[in-house]
Amino acid sequence: MSGPTTASSPVGRSRRRSQRTRPPAALTILALVIALLSLAPVGYLLLRGGLSPNLLIHELRSPTTGTLIIHTITLTACVTAVCIALGVGLALLVVRTDLPFRSLWTVLFALPLGIPAFVTSYTWVATGYRVMPQSTFIYGLRGAVIVLSLAVYPYVYLPVVAALRGLDPAHEETARALGSNAFTAFFRVTLPQLRTAIAGGSLLIALHMMAEFGALELLRYQTLTTAIVQRVTVLSAPEAARTLSVVLALGAFILLGGDWLLRGHAAPTRTGGGAPRPAAPWRLGALKPFWLLVCLLLMALALGVPLYSMVNGLVNALTHSGAPIDWAELGAAASYTAQTSLATALAATLVALPVSLLAVRFPGWIATLSERATWVAHSLPGVVISLALVYLSVRWLYPFYQTSALLVVGYVILFLPIAVGAQQGGIVQASPHYDNISRSLGVGPLITFLRVTLPLALPSVAAGSMLVFLNAGKELTMTLLLHPTGKHTLATALWATTNGEVLDFSSAAPYAITLVVITAVPAFILIRHTLHPTR
Amino acid sequence: MQELDVREHLITQAQPSIALSVRGVTKTFPARPAPVAALRGVDLTVVSGSFTAILGASGCGKTTLLRLIAGFDRPDSGEIRLSDRVLAAPGLHVSPERRNIGIVPQEGALFPHLSVAQNVGFGLGSWQLRSLSRRARRARAERIAELLELVGLPEYGERRPGELSGGQQQRVALARALAPNPRVVLLDEPFSALDAGLRAELREEVRELLQRVGTTAILVTHDQEEALSLADHVAIMRDGLVVQADSPQGIYIAPGDPHIAAFIGEVVLLPGRFVDNPDIPAPCAECALGCVAVRMAGGSGTTSEQCMVLLRPEQLEIADHGAAARVVSTSFFGHDGIVRLRLGEDGSGPPVLVRIQGNRLPSSGDLVAVRIAGNRSAGVAAPAFSVTR
């Protein structure tokens, strides 16, 4: 944080004016090329699919498609709603109440972020099979909503915790002084200020639900995405898959548009100066044991079940009561995951830099266009981008078909906006104000970028790389469609052990644990970064 | 005073060493609903080695002018020269890093990722190939030590900017700006974020330091006390124009118009008319406080022509006899006080301010007598403005 003081300094005061200067041509061209490339696969797919209206209408009229659409919408709405309730509720519990061990709970509640949703589902299915083999409780919509909500609610919880901590308690106190009670003050003053954080997290979750494949396949709930993957891999019906992709893409666009409308203008959370001071906590009083129990139960479900299954499965595998561990394959999958994720993180960071720089430093229609273009690609389910990349490479870039390079390209397109979003925060802090001073000291523009802008933005740039690494490491759907034959990531190797029939977690456990170890490190760093923001 | 002005004028005539000149500079920013003309033809001359203050209310364009001089923005028209080198002209723009003009921003704005020494050494070419030699590195370290010594922070090289107080950050910012030996250093309201005591102390220090180094300095400020006490040349800006440029005394004694007068200090403006007075050789005007020697700042001075006579509160006093006035209110400042009066026994006349010693403040409602202090024929020489403004 550069603090409220530097923002008002005169060199910075004219920032909005000086931003009207035109961006360097090279930067503009670079950003436009990136925008074009990230739109290319989607554009191709939409044009191809959209240009055959007969097929589209035919597919839409089939009764299965209608069911799939309804399923997708129901699941997305239910999981998003449950996650908002869960995420906001838990955030309030750890930030605003006198719950015992608050700092411990704060971190614990965020940890499900480190376990991919399909791994959580896998462990639930395996546990369910072992405990109650005849029960179908966790299958279908009910199971999907419960399991997926437990897996993805941190996407709402984390930003809301950060936003709650950054709020100026003076607003709520003023409302109280004006005659509101604690609850009306919260709903009228505090909750509206959390809108941006909640909207951002919900959008991520809703998009995730539309794109989820692995978890829903295991929990036996058919959505558009599972149907598309099925049509490509099992039924070999690429035309039908493409048409369904267009329907799914349209849904994603509607969601994105709705989010922009809902979010409106983000209001500043703190208007006053000085250090934020914590608001007086709400007393839980006699209900304290009850809330502690709720927290314990929740963590037992969200973290206990997956961890227990993994450890238990690993013990089984090691004691040879289950299938023996294929160490060579595990090693190969782990190293391939690390390689592709690392390559993706580096590439996405480099590609994102021009887009973020342009968006922060030179706002205008070109900047908006390139930034939105990356978001459009991200809002589309991975399966849609994968299909587009498959078609594009088969048609025009055959040497790329079935290579790791194509997989990395897919990852980069999918996760680019994550890097852009993280970098922008840092570039905002590295205000042009510092560039001006550097220039006045006789340092040219390029060296100024290297000596001033980049070091100041580095923490955020690094955080963006971490996020991309995390996401690429646990990606399943796109990897299933794009990975070269014979090469497996941990996610696909883990997926291969389900074989469609889940009986035991033993053979999956080594992959799951390795995957969780790989993704947990960046997840933990991300959690720390969100919960303890440093300058 | 007038004589002194003339002498100063002659000195600058004899050594016309101009450090920086700004000629007819304009700058308009696109804005809605209408474009904003921030500068509308600014002229400014800064003499080598001088300390010039650009004084104006917020929004007058002073920060824009500073940014143009530093090279952060381009003027729409006009010319900026550094002695004989053109920095900005139509079709020509020297980038900031080639201007050799330093800047000390408000709040210091030290690079947060660098130590104090690294901040000071930032402009000393550490990223150039030829600076890699051991000799260059040693010279650089010596220069940093010398500058930190100069600003009184010799032991602070390894500190982080966040560990310094506001005043210390400003000093480091000054050292950083002076390090590459700039031809001109721009001070952008550098004291405004500090508390009153520290501000006064740091101002004195900075002035002394700049005198010792001999660097030409331009201070942008909205604080008239700061401008008058620090600078040896003051340029007043209003609505994108330099409306008056003179020595601090010159501006205080002979302001160009009543607005400038009111901007740089408390004023008493009384309606009057020019008269012939055989006792006073200079032109003089008759006002509610009697006959005053005036200097013409407007109007022709024709006898019995209407005018506005400008007096300062310290030129008036409360005495045993004089014009009757009612006390409206008083303000106590410690070292002195201001008494707000309205002339006339019933307090219906024009308002008047009198500065008196703080321990003798009258009470509201008192009836007092007010008169012009000292020798009214020679000591006052109040500016008289034309009424037809």
Image (cartoon, helix red, strand yellow):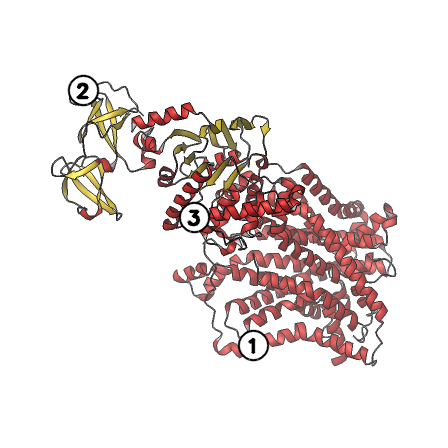
Question: Which residue is denoted by mark 3 in the rendering?
Answer: B193
Q: What distance separates the C-alpha of mark 1 from that of mark 2?
A: 95 Å
Residue situated in front as seen by the camera: A215 or A508: A508
Chain of the residue under label 2? B
Q: Is residue A382 visible?
A: yes
For mark 2, what is the residue? B276
Badge 1 marks a residue whose secondary structure is helix
For label 2, count other residues whose C-alpha is less than 10 Å away and answer few (under 14), some (14-19) or many (20+): some
Residue type highlighted by circle 1: Leu
Instruction: Name the N-terminal-most of marks 2 and 3.
Output: 3
Amino acid at circle 2:
Asp
Question: Do the residues under discs 2 and 3 have CB atoms within 8 angstroms?
Answer: no
Task: Bin the neighbour count of mark 1 within 10 Å (Cα to Cα): few under 14, some 14-19, many 20 and up.
Answer: some
Disc sitting over residue A292 in the figure: 1
For this rendering, which residue is in front, B231 or A219? B231
Asked if both marks, 2 and 3, belong to the same chain, the answer given is yes
Taking the spot 49% from the left edge, 28% from the top edge, the residue there is B25
Q: Are marks 1 and 2 in contact (CB under 8 Å)?
A: no
Checking the image for residue B255, the label placed there is none
